[in-house]
Amino acid sequence: AELPPWWARTTVYQIYPRSFLDTNGDGIGDLPGIVRKLDWLRDLGVETLWICPFYRSPQQDLGYDISDYDDVAPEYGTMDDVRRLVDEAHARGLRVVADMVLNHTSIEHPWFQESRSSRTNPKRNWYLWRPGKKPGGKAPPNNWRSLVGPRGWHWDPRTEEWYWASFLPFQPDLDYRNPEVQEAMLGVVRRWLAFGFDGLRLDIFHALFKDERFEDNPFSTRILPSEDDPDGFFQSYRRTLHHPETITFARTLRRVADEFQDPPRFLVGEVFGQPGALRRYSEGGDGLHSVFLFKAMRAPFTAAGFRELVSEFEREMRAPLVPTWVFGNHDRSRRGERLGHHPEREKLCAAVQLTARGIPFVYYGEEIGMRDLELPLATARDPLARMYRFLPDFVARRLHAAGVLLNRDACRTPMQWSSAPNAGFSPPGAVPWLPVHPAAELVNVEAEERDPASILHCYRRLLRLRKTRPALQAGALELYPERALPPEVLAYRRTFGDDVVDVLLHFDDATRRVRIPGNCSAALASTYPAPLPIRDGHAVLRPYEALVLGP
Ligand code: TEU
Ligand code: CA
């Protein structure tokens, strides 16, 4: 059997540049900081780095509001620093994926400045401008709501029309039905791929095309629909998300990516919805290579919950489609929050992520069990938090209960490298852009390097093993039947050609002896520093232990 392309086998580490390492003491993480940690990242064993936006930006949404796609935010570094980052990463065998925000620009982008200047400006129709519904203009064109709750139409008094923004008011959406816009943005994509990036992570890709008739949504709510409620979600966003032309555009983008080879470039879409609906973005092999599946963040932490999840991923993302394993990112509560800051549980999640079929995405800090830091909404850097501050209490509580992070600063605090001042993120005496989590005293890279039972070492062991086993990188997955094991244990087999691996995942706080389900009886790795010996066809599983077995 022949191994699939690199992107289908890789492991991804997500870096939020602002929070990774500050080398010049201005309190802001920078590109030289990432370069300085490349050896460490290679030794950790991750294979691809996804770098959140580093382009020039007023930073109202911390880089997701771009004012120049062809330049670097000066606080992060220079174009030379990007060059160095890509080259030095490649020199270590690492791949680098850039974040690409196609859907919208910053309000400060010269294109929008021109567009808003008059109704006859040549860039007017680069964005979505509409007259109001009623004479006088003061009623929005329709009932569409932004992805964050309130309406997405914004009145511009200068030209007395409304512009559309899927996210926040300072992030106006581009009009992808305008061929000039497509050409301009495909140019941006080509330039960064030609620069040497190995792929792109596509920000809110599912929002690119909107209903061309601008008809009302059948249903509209001020309260964010839950992703678990596909009907509500679909009804209130029917005209603004997952438009068939967006799927078509995924193919256009793929053709552009395929202009580059050695290596083939990778496109991963940020899209929301149920796995079955998201499949459309990559089905047929000529669209996006993969899409984020956020469902792992909501699955009940039980063997049954994960059995269901793995089955769904297998069913809906059947090979050659490749699922993704995401437990956190820069928008969501950190994984440890949901697991009660329980290292053994976090390690079990890591084991699922690194041994089930799919592309693992590890959010910086996840590998050491970093926590959310609760910070006041009023002084937040996150523009969403400053908006949510005005929500009625009961709505805020409902959002919180649905797992929406009201202040995304919480999961973006500085990387905890050591117990030194500023956790080693900024030089002593500097003031980091967000406070360092007080838990950094104990939860940090340096401390975990010393502890073979740490989450960090668990990642290292499993990543190392994965590199040597085609079955883990690219093998088919088959679940063992429920009756083969106690209800607290989930088990599957990965097979690639002659390479076979069995994985046992123990979702319980007890120690139990189980009969191994197949003929693999050599313990290859555990989430504990060393696996216990297999005797008489039985394995002893400690609390939340994951065990990888070979023949
Ligand atoms: O996020 C899109 C998005 O809708 C969510 O992740 C959202 O932030 C979350 O559900 C709110 O609870 C992407 C980026 O990941 C995010 O950081 C940007 O702010 C956003 O797009 C706008 O570009
Ligand atoms: Ca800095």
Image: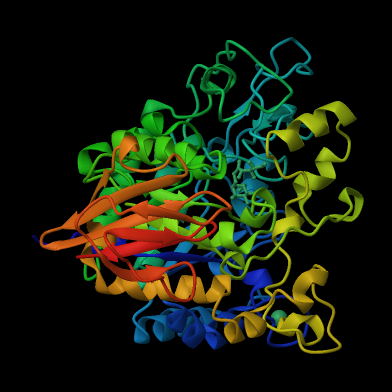
**Residue 259, visible in the rendered structure:** no
Image position of 537 (left or right of 242)? left
Image position of 268 (left or right of 127)? left
Quadrant for residue 446, please give it: bottom right
Q: Residue at x 51, y 49 (%)?
A: 507
Residue 187 x %, y %: 39, 57
Q: With respect to residue 406, does 54 lie above or below?
A: below
Q: With respect to residue 390, does 411 lie above or below?
A: below
Residue 331 x %, y %: 64, 50
Image position of 359 (left or right of 414)? left
Q: With respect to residue 451, does 353 lie above or below?
A: above
Residue 494 x %, y %: 24, 54
Q: Residue at x 21, y 38 (%)?
A: 284
Residue 83 x %, y %: 46, 81
Quadrant that contains the C terminus: bottom left
**Residue 344, visible in the rendered structure:** yes
Quadrant that contains the N terminus: bottom left
Image position of 535 (left or right of 107)? left
Q: Residue furthest front?
A: 536
Quadrant for residue 278, please give it: top left
